[in-house]
Amino acid sequence: MTESSHLSYCPDLFRYQRRGSREVNVGGVGVGGGNPIRVQSMITADTLDTESCVAEVLELANAGCEIVRITAQTRKYAANLEHIRSGVRAAGCEVPLVADIHFKPDAALEAAKWVDKVRVNPGNYADKKKFEVREYSDVEYEEELDRIRLKFVPLVELCKEMGRAMRVGTNHGSLSDRIMNRYGDTPLGMVESALEFVRIARDLDYHNLIFSMKASNPKVMIEAYRLLIARLDEQGPDWNYPIHLGVTEAGDGEDGRIKSAIGIGSLLNDGIGDTIRVSLTEDPVHEIPVAQAIVENQNRDSGSCSLLEDTAATTAPSWDPFSYRRRASNVVEINGHELGGDKVFRVLTSRHKWEALAHKLDKLGDFQPEIIIEESGVRAIDPRDPAAIEEIDTLKIPALITVLDGIDMEVVPAFRLLASKMTAAHPILLKDTLRTHGETSRDFLDTLLTASRNIGSLLCDGIGDAIIIQGEDAPGQSLRISYNILQAAGARIFKTDYVACPSCGRTLFNLQTTTQKIREATGHLKGVRIAVMGCIVNGPGEMADADFGYVGGAPGKINLYVGREAVKFNIPEEEAVARLIGLISEHGKWVDPPVRETVEI
């Protein structure tokens, strides 16, 4: 355990308990307190196009979206929120509206007149990012905070006067130079950035606040939220503000859903989260059923864990929730595959599924089954059974272990308990569900979200050395889910990784079609991370997590990045994908795509 081990974000890591928070009213919709987890999204239309904005808001509300966000890049855009609001209300729709603010305090002041909530990003609300490296003395740091106070206080006072809510939403990759130089681009920096602004609000007795800590990397996002909750608890019981959850730039399709389920689902599993937004590079209306399914999935599985003792008092977790480190274990060899230790995370399947695929393994591409569970020698035990634990621990040779199917525990607490009770020598096989055959007939999205939440959460805790999908009966689909979860959790990279933001009114090109073009051209570059950003707001910062970036610089013009540094500017959009390939080649990361038969999954 590290020096952060004294921190606590959850009263019992082995039993579900929803975090208590105060209620914040957002245009008549209660967030936090005893309210259900609220689902929200963001429109993509130009904020100056009133008719299109109203239509999109109504479409989202009709789909079940409970809070709708609209970008307001400048005061001129913010002023048109008056007309959008009027159009929405004239249509008989009372869904709360939120203004998304970056860089422009005057836009926030205008927007607060017309919307129910204002979202500010502390990293760029009062700062111009120059990515400067410098040391701030304590006096200089305080001078910076005084400068921020002057810009932020008017918004707080206006929101307080008008009864508006505010989200203080930090994004990994868009932290101020001041925070970056003192804390780095870290979860701690994200938390401190938000706390600086909230302290100013509290000084003015303004408490209609919601926090968020969003990142495109689920591990970073999970750690940041956990650290935030621990820090809020340290501040005192009246710092119990509601939490907005989201994985930013999650992407599209199955990958976007998996990454969102890992980040959002793992935190909901620990009782954290009062409102969520699933950020997909798709039409926003497609985000709503996914978000609803994540909430329903969590509600179904919460609180059904049965333990024999007060685990919070008697069991110390074997992992540090605030700093990722893979659980130590010995290496074992099964069916010619090494697993455990620092070896590759392995994918298991059942004999039945293996036999169904045996005739076309050469057509499965990267989605290969590696070990048959019936031939693995895995030892399945109930982690609450001391005799079973002792029997395994007395073995002279390490064994692959897993949780017994059919026990009355949920997956995450069961495997956490197994990892904490067992000797570290034994590698662990993770399962998506412990339900026995015949209990798993759910629709595909629910199966996907369950597997992503359970296995992805444990992988981000550093627990597990191999995985098996039991909840999906289709052999090929179960393998695809396995590999995509490993990729999204950063456990086993087998294909190109994309960071793709959702569209909004700031977007300078068609994100969906452009992302697809880039995927088609670069999807064979294993281990290369490419960011596709519609505008500059999160561009430079999120580039820090990517090898290369494709960012909207102006209408019809693209800037290309290496890391967070822009290296090519104002490229015509029709040339930009080819120029991106050239840039990848310049840096020695391009290979020609392989010729292979179509994958049949």
Image: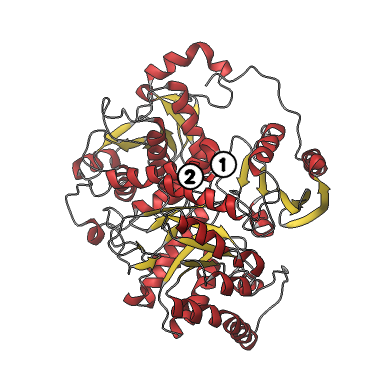
In the depicted structure, whether residue 237 falls above or below residue 516: below
Residue projecting furthest to the left: 308
Give percent across and percent down for residue 330: 44, 41
The image quarter in which residue 228 lies: bottom left
Q: Residue at x 78, y 48 (%)?
A: 556
Q: Residue type at mark 2: give it.
A: Glu
Badge 1, how many Cα within 10 Å: few under 14, some, many 20+? some
Query: In front here: 267 or 538?
Result: 538
- Above or below residue 580? Residue 11 is below
Query: In this view, which residue lies farthest toward the bottom?
Result: 139
Q: Tell me which numbered mark, 2 or 1, is placed earlier along the sequence.
A: 1
Residue at 38% over, 18% down: 351
**Count of all numbered marks drawn on residues in the image:** 2
Report the Cα–Cα distance between label 2 and label 1. 8 Å
Q: Which residue is mark 1?
A: 282
- Above-or-below relation of 55 to 21: above
Residue under circle 2? 287
Which one is in front, 223 or 384? 223
**The quadrant where residue 452 appears:** top left
Question: In the shown orientation, is residue 159 left or right of residue 181?
Answer: left
- Could you tell whether 535 is left or right of 456 in the image? right
Asked whether residue 388 appears in the rendered view, the answer is yes
Mark 2–mark 1 CB contact (< 8 Å): yes
Where residue 172 appears, x then y in whole percent?
Answer: 57, 60
SS type, badge 1: loop
Element on which disc 2 rests: helix
- Residue type marked 1: Glu
Q: Which of these two is toward me, 41 or 575? A: 41
